[in-house]
Image: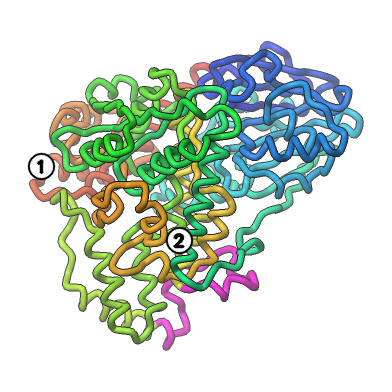
Amino acid sequence: MCGILGIMGRIDTDLARRCLATIRHRGPDGEGLWQDNGVTLGHRRLAILDTSEAGRQPMSYANQRYWITFNGEIYNFIEIRAELEGKGHRFGTGTDTEVLLAAFVEWGESCLPKLNGMWAFAIWDVHQQRLFLSRDRLGKKPLFYAETQFGFAFASEMKALFPLLGTIDANSDLIRDRARLFTYETTSECVIRGISRFPAGSYGWFEKGRLRLSRWWCTLDHLPRVPSRYEEQVDCLRELLIDSCRIRMRSDVPIGTALSGGLDSSAVMATMKEVAKRGGAQRGGRDWQHAFVASFPGTPLDESHYAKEVADHLGVPATFIKIDPVEAMGRLEEFFYLFEDLYITSPIPFMLTYGAVKKAGISVTLDGHGADELFGGYSFDYLFALRDAGASVGQALGIIRTFYDAWPKETQQFPALPHPLLYWGRWHLAYLKSKLIGRPTENSSSDAAHEKWGQLDHLSRQLYRSTHETVLPTLLRNYDRYSMANGVEIRMPFLDHRILTFAFALPWHAKLRGGYSKAVIRDAVKPFLPPGIVWRKSKLGFNAPVVDWFKGPLRPIFLDMIADKAFRQCDLIDPVAASGAVHHVIESPHASFQDGERAWTLLMPYLWERAVVKRSVLTA
């Protein structure tokens, strides 16, 4: 896991190193730069596999014909290496990087489907004078590119390209459009003009001054046949999760887990223990007993007692991280600079959590991200299954009851819900209306023309969009920044492509079943976890308690902020609306969590501009 850079054009070495320095946080363990005949490849290293100097990048292969700069991990590199050795390849390091490079030499772009991992990498072919770029199936690892005054350039983060741009201009149309906060990550458009995002699940060739992009992965092309019996589906998922954790525990450094106490992170930590009982990972991965828990004492979003129950049950020591927003506010500008993008909540708890992970000497975590999107963990998705239930009153009421039971009971910061029958009636009326006017009420997808799209039920279609086009891509972007800002790598067992395709081959009633969301996950991990964790219905999620912070410790800071002249003159915000939203959260005894998110979202472009654009202009 690292930071990468490349420029296809002549550039001064000092300028190239200046670009690399902007992403040193992604790779605190070393720097590499290779230049030849107008081509520059750069690398910042986070050493995970073969931490010796043999693993440094850029790395060459085949008598220095091919050079690679690689960000990510190939978890099945041991198996691929064995296959390549059978074809005569010989290896001088213990890295997945060398295996990846040899796989490309052997199979070209056809190597990509063989890879189980996360990546953004570039390979330069010295003989043919062309560049190959690729990004993993879901875009877990970022990749940006731009045409600059020095030539075509790419990097892991936008800030690494800033020194190459003539000007650093905010994309104000995008930034002002709050409706696009969960959709722009899957487009080429970025918050900085002149920079594009390389698409997930794609590869590209750059030669003769032109980039040609091709999509190599579509989840719908790979849906497996799943057992028809629910009990067998549960067994399949359990074994997939165990193997996914097993290969993700391959590491030459200690690993841990960011444990929230919710089902997903608890399932991952429990499965890691099961892997250890079965003999562990084939390489390293024995030092995994490290749990890190963010706590928000005195706020409704504190779930640390659930995390303690899990850690105690598994016999894993837990480090509890008390999130202090006042202490962190002095670093907010730094956090925004490292984050680069826009989101609906404060980066403070996430940055502090992974900072504590790193401080404890852990550089890799296995976390539970992705399960909600694949298996129906968000209450706002449940109601799409009402159309799958059809005329079955029992199934429909079960879905609505699941929706109600997931609503957080621990906090009064969420609005009350009307009677379940009212929801049922509303949804059926909306469905009938859509039939009459010929306008579907559910979100479609860019893959809706695929022949397999029609085989998905209504819930799975909604989850597909959340996974590939809205929620998950945004969260993957966020957690890459939160973790890599601190030199920590996150591995996500639920997002193994075998589990990804399995999830979308399952029927909706394997996900919503018996009054429970993510039913198939619950049943898969129930042998490993306390019943109170497995069968807990309410869901809070890992969020900043922004309402408590606005009303309490951060009140004077935000009041001073909205009174500042620079705030009132910022072109990226509506200062009147933002000020009103802040005052409402501070003054109203009934301010909801959604009110807090709205206030933060309205403030955010001002904080972002100050931290990213103005700082970069001053240091350019």
**Which quadrant, please, contains the N terminus?**
top right
Task: Say left or right for 580 vs 461.
Answer: left
Image coordinates for residue 281, horizontal then vertical, percent: 55, 34
Image height check: is 71 above or below 244? above
Disc on the earlier residue, 2 or 1? 2
**Which quadrant, please, contains the C terminus?**
top right
Image height check: is 441 above or below 586? below
The magenta-colored residue range is: 434-457
Q: Residue at x 40, y 64 (%)?
A: 511
Q: Residue at x 26, y 76 (%)?
A: 397
SS assignment at label 2: helix
In this view of the protein, which residue sits in the foreground, 174 or 135?
A: 135
Mark 2 neighbour density, 10 Å: few (under 14) some (14–19) many (20 or more): many
Residue 578, picture quadrant: top left
SS assignment at label 1: helix
Image height check: is 88 above or below 174? above
The reply to whether discs 2 and 1 touch (Cβ–Cβ < 8 Å) is no
Q: Which residue is mark 2?
A: 234
Image height check: is 224 above or below 65? below
Between marks 2 and 1, how big is the CA–CA gap? 49 Å
Residue 153 image label: none
Q: Which residue is mark 1?
A: 587
In this view of the protein, which residue sits in the foreground, 246 or 399?
A: 246
Residue type marked 1: Glu
Residue 539 belongs to magenta span:
no
Q: How is the image coloured?
A: rainbow
Image coordinates for residue 224, horizontal then vertical, percent: 61, 64
